[in-house]
Image (cartoon, rainbow, N blue to C red):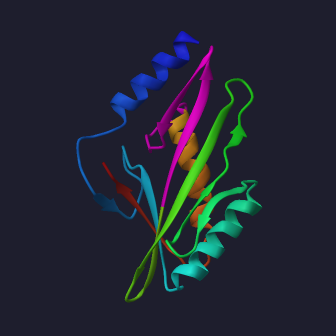
Amino acid sequence: MKYLLCLSLLGSLLGRPALAQTEAPAPFRGANTIVVYTRDSAAVALQKMARLLVVDGYALGQNDPALGYFTTVGKAVGQVTPATYTYRVVALPGPAGTALRVSGEYTIPVGPRTISESMFWVKGNLLHAKQCFSAVERVALAYPQGRVAYLLRP
């Protein structure tokens, strides 16, 4: 357990550069948000993304189409150190379509406590933060006729 805690803390320290709101077409170290650009309206974009997440095994949690967001219910992933992944999708309508901003976090039990941390991209695949990121990245890349970008938000 101590090893996992140290690995998680080390990953969070090494994986996040001190930049704000940097966007790129490919994942970069520390990216913690995935943006899907689409020509769909906000309502249609949210429905498509929700459908993709449901097909991937997630259940929808909070949902407010008027405010343009939904969250997923935590999904347990892994066997050795089970983690729960939860995602939030926010629709940002614009003149040429909608940007879906996807962020997420994972929670792992450590003895009587739990540790929660936001997802982020790093080169290796040993951290829960990267695995959480990769799981929703696969869903975002499956969005029909969408363009994916990566963002570092504070």
**Location of residue 75 in the rendering, given as x and y in whole percent from the top left corner:** 70, 44
**Location of residue 37 in the rendering, given as x and y in whole percent from the top left corner:** 46, 75
Q: Give the range drawn in magenta.
A: 102-127
Residue lying at 68% horizontally and 61% vertically, measured from the top left: 53
Q: Quadrant of residue 22?
A: bottom left
The front one of 153 and 16 is 153
Residue lying at 44% horizontally and 40% vertically, measured from the top left: 123
Residue located farthest toward the top when viewing the structure as drawn: 2
Q: Can residue 59 be seen in this view?
A: yes
7 is higher (above) or lower (below) than 45: above
Residue 60 left/right relative to 91: right
Residue lying at 76% horizontally and 54% vertically, measured from the top left: 57
**Location of residue 41 in the rendering, given as x and y in whole percent from the top left corner:** 52, 85
Residue lying at 27% horizontally and 57% vertically, measured from the top left: 21
Q: Quadrant of residue 78?
A: top right
Residue located farthest toward the bottom when viewing the structure as drawn: 95
The magenta stretch spans residue 103: yes
Quarter of the image with the N terminus is top right
The front one of 30 and 44 is 44
**Location of residue 77 in the rendering, given as x and y in whole percent from the top left corner:** 70, 38
Residue 71 left/right relative to 102: right
Residue 103 left/right relative to 47: left
